[in-house]
Amino acid sequence: MKINQNYKNLKASYLFSDIAKKTAAYKAQNPDADIIRLGIGDVTLPLCSAVVDAFHKAADEMGVKESFKGYGPEQGYGFLKDAIKDYYKAEDGVTLEADEIFISDGAKSDLGNILDIFAKDNTVLVPDPVYPVYVDTNIMDGRNIVYMNGTAKNNFLPMPDDSVDADLIYLCSPNNPTGAAYNHEQLKAWVDYATKKGAIILFDAAYESFVISKELVRSIYEIEGARNCAIEFCSFSKIAGFTGTRCGWTVVPMELEADGMSLNKMWLRRQTTKFNGVSYPVQLAAAAVFTPEGRAQIAENLAYYRENAKIITAALDELGIWYTGGVNSPYIWLKCPNGMGSWEFFDLLLTKANVVGTPGAGFGAMGEGFFRLTAFGDRERTREATERIKKLFK
Ligand code: PLP
């Protein structure tokens, strides 16, 4: 028996446990401290009523012989794929075929699982700072990883470099952790680069629902040529608070081919072999997100988070602190004031303002000196946290 030696190359991730430990230690010494957490990437508003009603309906159907459902289609029920198709058409002007959409239990699983259809000797291009899943899933397979640096100078939106050869390219827009989002022109440059290199873009659109600026892109398929070089991952987690409910989707266009093989057919084969689909109640609940009532209700939730982001960015504007994100994203990525390091700033905020955020260094070397705040918190607590930050830095 031999283990997968690549697991020895994984760096232990202590980011969130270190944050929890430091926060708990401070609280133990200062039991009266009223700590506000603006660090989490999880949503806080409950499922909307259209979704809850669909869950009830599905549960009732499952309890009756005539409407009971056993195994469903591995790629997802037609009603949900059609609803997603209509969403793309209405929101992005993008036309998809139902067979190009694969329903899953979330974007994270698909982002990891998609690597099954790619060779292990591919070179992978990954932004830094980055959502750690892209890096670790490739380390597990032993792929060569090349980083593209996000900096304040490029507004944390790295652009293609012709001198770098890559086979798989990860783009996340709007980005976690930086909140930065690509516009049409920038993504066109990425599509052109991928086409020239014969590479595939793995486009993570988990935060697309936060995009409001017209010049920005929600789906990579808004870009000409993307159907020939890109796979898109999306999720109900952030659009509709499904982080605990679990549902997402992946789009693999029919045009994608390599070595005479259709990537769509390969992914279909992979999913039908290793995945038995998402439960019927979850899919019915997910489809309810796209009904007129569901759309109206999630719009209210998104507006709530957007307003939180506005409260945070207004405070940073007032203090003259540099940041990206916040407008088209629930994340605000700020430059630690006075040249402080990420953890130094974390300690200062924790001890002097009793506010917890996420040190940027935890997302990659280029995150050092930066800090992530999120708009997923409670309104009054977010307001209180920003008042404390303002008081501290004024
Ligand atoms: N992609 C990014 C960039 C994320 O930040 C997250 C979750 O935080 C995910 C994917 C995971 O989404 P899901 O909950 O659908 O697995």
Image (spheres, rainbow, N blue to C red):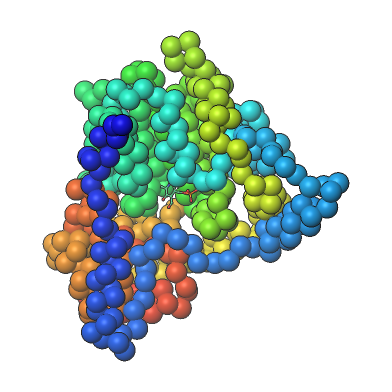
As drawn, 291 above or below 381: above
Q: Is residue 6 left or right of residue 198?
A: left
* x then y, percent, for residue 175: 38, 48
- In this rendering, the count of numbered labels is 0
The residue lying furthest to the top in this view is 260
* x then y, percent, for residue 118: 40, 24
Q: Residue at x 47, y 31 (%)?
A: 231
The residue lying toward the viewer, choosing from 393 and 285, is 285
The residue lying toward the viewer, choosing from 293 and 159, is 293
Q: Is residue 237 left or right of residue 37?
A: right
As drawn, 229 above or below 342: above
As drawn, 223 above or below 61: above
**Quadrant of the rendered structure where residue 193 is?**
top left
The residue lying furthest to the front in this view is 1
The residue lying furthest to the right in this view is 66
The residue lying toward the viewer, choosing from 5 and 145, is 5
As drawn, 149 above or below 229: below
Q: Is residue 370 left or right of residue 138?
A: left
Q: Residue at x 49, y 35 (%)?
A: 232
* x then y, percent, for residue 107: 48, 44
The residue lying toward the viewer, choosing from 68 and 310, is 68
Question: Can residue 313 be seen at all in this image of the molecule?
Answer: no
* x then y, percent, for residue 179: 37, 52
Quadrant location of the C terminus? bottom left
**Quadrant of the rendered structure where residue 25 is?**
bottom left
Q: Residue at x 56, y 21 (%)?
A: 265
Q: Residue at x 61, y 62 (%)?
A: 47
The residue lying furthest to the left in this view is 339
Question: Can residue 23 be seen at all in this image of the molecule?
Answer: yes
Q: Is residue 126 left or right of residue 83?
A: left
Quadrant location of the N terminus? top left
